[in-house]
Image (tube, rainbow, N blue to C red):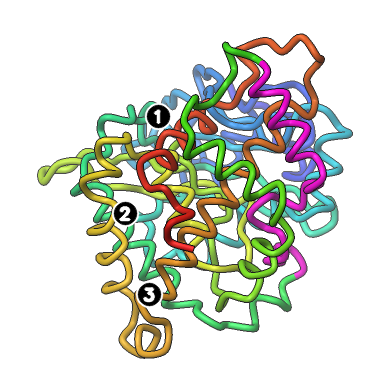
Amino acid sequence: MRMPRMDITALIERAAECGDPTSIGEELLAMTGAADATVDRYGSLDGGNPQKSQVFRIGISGHAMGLTHAIVKIPAKLRSDRVQEAVSGTYARDYGGYNLLRDMQGGFQPRIFAAHYDPVTKTSALLIEDLGDLPKRRQFEPKVLHDALFNLAQIHSRYWGDESLRTRWWMRDGYRADIFDEDVDQFAPNWAKLTASEVLRPSSTQTVDEVADFLAANMSEVLQELDDRPRTLTHGDLHTANMMLRRTDDGFKPVLIDWQDAVYSGASSDVAKFLSTTMSPEDARCHFDDLIVGYHAALRTDIRSYYSLTVFRRDVVLALLGTFANYVISATTSCSSDIDPKTLNHSLKRVSSVIDVLQPLREL
């Protein structure tokens, strides 16, 4: 039997603190018209960032538009994390990003069955389509990558140069967005710490070492050039785990999730981070050029007329360097001197392997 309803903001707070999506899940179901539906089971999902949000798969009983499962996303468990993320606009960005792209739901965006954002606490709760488990890297075949970049270009084209995005208090600014405003002075010591360990060394190649040396000497110039790009709505953290796959009669279709780091910045950052964390070195060698050309061709004609493929390609290379720098800076900053191999972000190894193939310094 369902408990009497509480204020939905209180339900969000209680669900976050208890790590239990039952009551807020039932309230979100009621918002869809399924007033008698209940949450009969739930389990937390791996792959997210618990300091930002908690994500659960729920089982549903009763009449709920045919739903038997869905995803509930609520704020972080610790109050200190929750308040910090709320003030920075994390929950408003997630809610706002999905709302901006609601016409793409069921396609390149997941279906959002119900959502609530509280402007006082700046927290939100979402009831989202269940797209299954995180996809395996091997499932991102070239056709899936092409589809993802085509859809991404549609989003970027829609908001290209849209200065109204700056008026939204929760939208992140593009300055140093590629490294999440981290301390650039941490790059060199963290790289030295990584390379001192045979276990953690992200790549033993001359190319990766040369890129690291280049960034240690030219980080500010790279970030400045990235900041001078034309801007649009970008996802801001488009790594593999933020791209789901929907199974259709025509095969897997990409679905972009999680707008918590949305930023008004350069489109090439989304492209570079997605490809470098998703592609195998073999795919990068065979398909990177075609994918870049395909994305650029999918931009609106008026954008392509002044944002040439040559300039865009250079911006992708710079964004690739920014992605690499971000992972290096964050890889060991919070770790002790005796680094546990498990603490190294797997994405750093992936990006390093792609850099080794693409040899980005030749492009610059």
Q: Is residue 171 visible?
A: no
Left or right? Give the position of 119 relative to 223.
right
Q: Quadrant of the N terminus?
A: top right
Q: CA distance from mark 1 to mark 3?
A: 34 Å
Residue 320 locus on image (x, y percent): 51, 52
- For disc 1, the marked residue is 134
* Camera-nearest residue between 243 and 61: 243
Q: Does the segment drawn in magenta span residue 186?
A: yes
Q: Does the segment drawn in magenta span residue 183?
A: yes
- What amino acid does circle 3 point to? Thr
The residue at the point 74 percent across, 60 percent down is 220
Judged from the image, the secondary structure of the residue bearing numbered disc 2 is: helix
Judged from the image, the secondary structure of the residue bearing numbered disc 3 is: helix
Residue 245 bears which disc, if any? none
Q: Are marks 3 and 2 in contact (CB under 8 Å)?
A: no
Residue 52 locus on image (x, y percent): 71, 37
The residue at the point 49 percent across, 63 percent down is 364
The residue at the point 42 percent across, 82 percent down is 307
The residue at the point 61 percent across, 67 percent down is 226
**Residue 234 quadrant:** bottom right
Q: Is residue 11 above or below residue 203?
A: below
- What amino acid does circle 2 point to? Ala
Crowd around label 2: few <14 · some 14–19 · many ≥20 (10 Å): many
Residue 148 bears which disc, if any? 2
- Spot the residue most to the right: 80
Judged from the image, the secondary structure of the residue bearing numbered disc 1 is: loop
- Spot the residue most to the left: 249
Specify which label sits upstream in the sequence, 1 or 3.
1
Specify which label sits upstream in the sequence, 2 or 1.
1
State the extent of the magenta-drawn residues as a range: 169-196
- For disc 3, the marked residue is 310
